[in-house]
Image (cartoon, coloured by chain):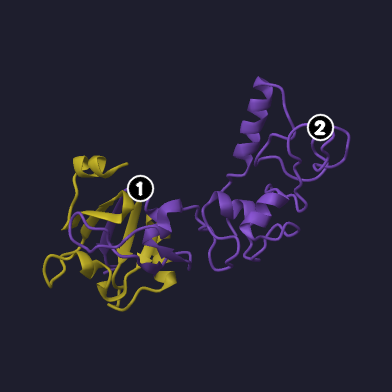
Amino acid sequence: MLRPRLRATPVVLALLMCAASACDPYSRDRGSRGGGDDDDGAGSDSDDDDGGGPSWVDSDGDGLSDDQEENLGTDPEDVDTDGDGWEDEEEVDLSTDPLDGDDHPYSMGWPIDPCRDELSVTGNQVGQVTAEFELLSQTGELVRLHDFCGRAVLMVTAAFW
Amino acid sequence: MVISLMGENNFSGPPSQSDLANWADTYGSTHPVLADPNFAVTARFLNSTSIALPTAHLLTTGAEVVIRDGWPGTSDIHNALP
């Protein structure tokens, strides 16, 4: 499956932030993943030996802490709780449901906006909010119109003949 | 965001995935190319009972209709952008 290469971005940003200030391994959010990679010699991301901020435990190394996974309802020991081929953190970042195997990012990297389930349909006249549709795409995936709710959409209708 | 809605294949039937994929490959389209069998979705936006192809419909953020069954100009598109 083709996947958008978005996961390196937070890592790069985190490195740049570390370069600009002292790095606190307990203050990080997403971007650092995997156990024992915090270079403190303790061999785990769960150590809290600075006596300071909250500990970071990411048992499955998917970039979401166990606490975050508990809040989301995902399995903290499974990188892909719903088994759809997309890691839990990817689904959270790309606004799909990590608990629904039928809901995952598009293979072509088409955007999914967080507002997609928040629209109140009013009609199809100018100024009204048009109804959802779900149509077959060239990839075989079903595409939902409201996934693009955060942007302008130009729909061009044609036929092959 | 651009979406192509294809109402019929070369034989006036509903487009299959391979129809859509072949068309996207031929024209190098990386945006969604979608099957709209019998122009059912397109019919929402038509101003009459007949269809003149191609036609276009412009939405702004929140899926709000800006232009139905027309051909938006550059300024229309700019105005619809968030």
What amino acid is found at the position of numbered circle 1 in the picture? Arg
Image spot of residue B11 (x, y percent): 29, 78
Residue A53, placed above or below residue A140: above
Question: On the rendered structure, is A73 left or right of B1?
Answer: right
Question: How dense is the environment of label 2, judged by Cα within 10 Å: few (below 14), some, or many (20 and up)?
Answer: few
Q: Is residue B82 visible?
A: yes
Tell me what hue chain B is rendered in. yellow
Q: Which residue is mark 2?
A: A51
Q: Nearer the viewer, mark 1 or mark 2?
A: 2
Image spot of residue A1 (x, y percent): 60, 60
Q: Residue furthest left?
A: B48
B74, B54: nearer the viewer:
B74
Chain letter belonging to callout 2: A
| Dot 2: element | loop
Q: Residue at x 22, y 63 (%)?
A: A124
Q: What is the C-alpha distance between the residues marked 1 and 2?
A: 45 Å
A72, B9: nearer the viewer:
A72
The answer to whether marks 1 and 2 sit on the same chain is yes
Question: How dense is the environment of label 1, judged by Cα within 10 Å: few (below 14), some, or many (20 and up)?
Answer: some
Tell me what hue chain A is rendered in. purple
In primary-sequence order, the first of circles 1 and 2 is 2
Residue B54, placed above or below residue B10: above
Image spot of residue A16 (x, y percent): 64, 26
Quarter of the C terminus of chain A within the rendering: bottom left
Q: Residue furthest front?
A: A51
Q: Which residue is mark 1?
A: A151
